[in-house]
Image (tube, rainbow, N blue to C red):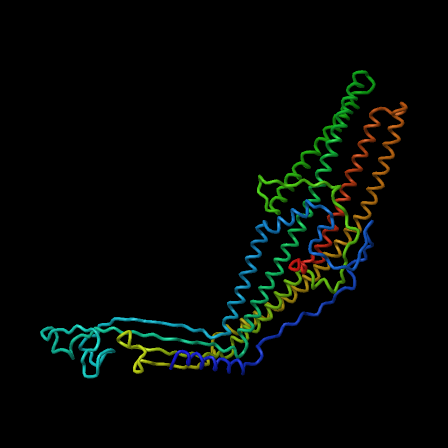
């Protein structure tokens, strides 16, 4: 049989096997029923902001209007090693899908086996390459009669033999086991895809949060340094008053304590600033000797409109929910794989080739051979191994369903928590603004009274200190509102579905 004829026949057999193949065994995937809430939380709009039903753009961080932040995130997406690792895992998962899909096609192998053999002359019969009358037609060495009888019948025979063959094999996917394997591999590939999308969103969100923290810490450090300077001035004033006997030693010691307390606030803030900048360097993929921008709180703008998509859309937008669903899909396919392993397995194998004592004679008509074999294999006893593997796959599927529902519930909780945080930020910011205005008014009154001699210098320093404390509380409230507004974009999915478009 010619090799091409063999391939055609095996191809026909494979096509017939696929034609008669039924539906794949095991459950077909269906998304579990979900009891979705009608709303995330009863949160009122934030001050100066409003919630709108809108799609989330891929580069949502640009809404804070900081070109420096935008450039840092774009750099991080290309330099962060975590993104590179997640991308490589995704590519590996895709290659596994391609590899599993290859089992749908017949395998074709070519083989060539040359050999050289010496047969003892006293074994009788003819060796390959020796004619029926005993005359040697290949390379031989005859032993003299004095060493073992008369030649050539009793002489050892040394001969060469060449075999070349083409083997075509096909495992018919009659019960759909390979289809379930491909389905499982595709689901795992999608898991890695959504984990990569989650890595992009998390990276951007972490950089945004670290940038806000950098700006807040710089503002706090500046205010503490102003407080230290004011307390130093107050201490110098009280020292002069002590020398003039205008105040007691106890009042002077109190001012010394106030200066020491102000100085104690500075080192922890400086430590947090440097550690936060170390985090920014790692997130952005910047070396320790690289340039890292400094952020200022006043350069960020709070978005006037915040997105609030429908609850039914959240299960489609959250990459962690989508990844959990793909894990569920993979577990469903694994049940079919385990069930198919307990059923008959079908395979077809065809071999064609030639054999001869001389290389050039392998494909003479006298040396050609072929074999076409079909087989069905059914496990009769395996000690319950396959049965328990199917039971384990079913339990894994139940666990995947519970894990998926838990992930969905966690996603809704995340959105609700962020909405409540924004609501709390609204109240905190309003109170901080009122306190700041009151402190500024008190300072203005104290300055006028000091100018007229009604208040001493210490009262003015105390009023200035109250303004700085109010400014620090206001900066904290503003940074919290910025951070929670950014967290809402992440909680609602981060707009990953637009990344490939842009």
173 lies above or below 419:
below
Q: Residue furthest top?
A: 244
The foreground one among 184 and 388 is 184
Q: Is 121 placed left or right of 449 in the picture? A: left
The residue at the point 82 percent across, 47 percent down is 427
| Image quadrant in which the N terminus is located | bottom left
Identify the residue at horizontal 42%, vertical 76% (top origin). 168
Q: Nearer the viewer, residue 175 or 403?
A: 175
- Choose between 183 and 501: the one closer to the eye: 501
Vertically, is 486 above or below 92? above
Q: Residue at x 71, y 53 (%)?
A: 60
Q: Position of residue 354 (x, y in %)?
A: 33, 78
* Residue 268, percent from left and from top: 67, 36
Q: Position of residue 156 (x, y in %)?
A: 18, 74
Q: Quadrant of residue 478?
A: top right
Outermost residue to the left: 146
Q: Quadrant of the C terminus?
A: bottom right
The answer to whether 501 is drawn above or below residue 154 in the figure is above
Give percent across and percent down for residue 264.
Answer: 70, 32
Q: Is residue 79 left or right of residue 460?
A: left
């Amino acid at each position: 049989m010619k090799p091409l004829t063999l391939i055609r026949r095996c191809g026909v057999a494979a096509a017939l096997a696929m034609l008669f193949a039924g539906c794949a065994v095991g459950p077909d995937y269906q998304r579990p029923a979900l009891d979705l809430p009608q709303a995330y939380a009863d949160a009122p709009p934030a001050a100066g902001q409003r919630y709108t039903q809108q799609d989330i753009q891929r580069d949502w961080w640009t809404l804070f209007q900081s070109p420096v932040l935008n450039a840092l995130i774009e750099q991080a997406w290309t330099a962060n090693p975590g993104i590179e690792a997640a991308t490589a895992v995704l590519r590996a998962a895709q290659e596994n899908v391609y590899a599993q899909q290859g089992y749908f096609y017949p395998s074709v192998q070519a083989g060539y086996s040359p050999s050289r053999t010496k047969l003892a002359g006293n074994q009788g019969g003819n060796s390959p390459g020796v004619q029926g009358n005993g005359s040697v037609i290949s390379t031989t060495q005859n032993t003299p009669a004095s060493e073992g009888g008369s030649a050539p019948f009793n002489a050892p025979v040394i001969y060469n033999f060449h075999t070349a063959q083409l083997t075509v094999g096909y495992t018919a996917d009659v019960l759909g086991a390979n289809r379930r394997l491909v389905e499982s591999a595709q689901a795992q590939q999608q898991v890695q895809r959504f984990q990569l999308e989650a890595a992009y969103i998390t990276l951007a969100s972490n950089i945004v949060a670290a940038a806000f923290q950098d700006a807040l810490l710089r503002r706090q450090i500046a205010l503490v340094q102003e407080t230290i300077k004011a307390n130093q001035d107050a201490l110098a004033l009280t020292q002069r008053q002590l020398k003039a006997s205008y105040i007691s030693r106890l009042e002077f010691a109190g001012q010394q304590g106030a200066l020491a307390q102000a100085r104690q606030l500075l080192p922890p803030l400086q430590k947090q600033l440097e550690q936060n900048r170390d985090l920014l360097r790692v997130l952005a993929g910047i070396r320790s000797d690289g340039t890292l921008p400094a952020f200022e709180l006043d350069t960020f703008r709070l978005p006037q409109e915040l997105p609030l998509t429908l609850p039914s859309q959240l299960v489609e937008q959250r990459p962690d929910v989508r990844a959990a669903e793909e894990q569920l899909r993979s577990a469903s396919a694994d049940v079919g794989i385990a069930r198919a392993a307990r059923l008959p397995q079908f395979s077809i194998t065809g071999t064609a080739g030639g054999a001869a004592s001389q290389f050039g004679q392998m494909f003479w008509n006298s040396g050609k051979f072929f074999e076409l074999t079909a087989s069905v294999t059914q496990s009769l006893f395996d000690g319950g191994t396959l049965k328990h593997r199917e039971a384990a796959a079913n339990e894994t599927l139940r666990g995947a369903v519970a894990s998926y529902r838990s992930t969905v519930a966690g996603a809704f909780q995340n959105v609700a928590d962020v909405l409540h945080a924004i609501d709390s930020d609204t109240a905190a910011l309003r109170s901080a603004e009122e306190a700041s205005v009151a402190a500024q008014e008190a300072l203005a009154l104290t300055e006028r009274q000091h100018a007229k001699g009604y208040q001493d210098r210490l009262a003015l320093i105390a009023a200035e200190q109250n303004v700085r404390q109010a400014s620090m509380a206001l900066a904290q409230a503003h940074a919290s509102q910025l951070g929670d507004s950014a967290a809402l974009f992440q909680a609602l999915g981060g707009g990953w579905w637009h990344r490939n478009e842009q």
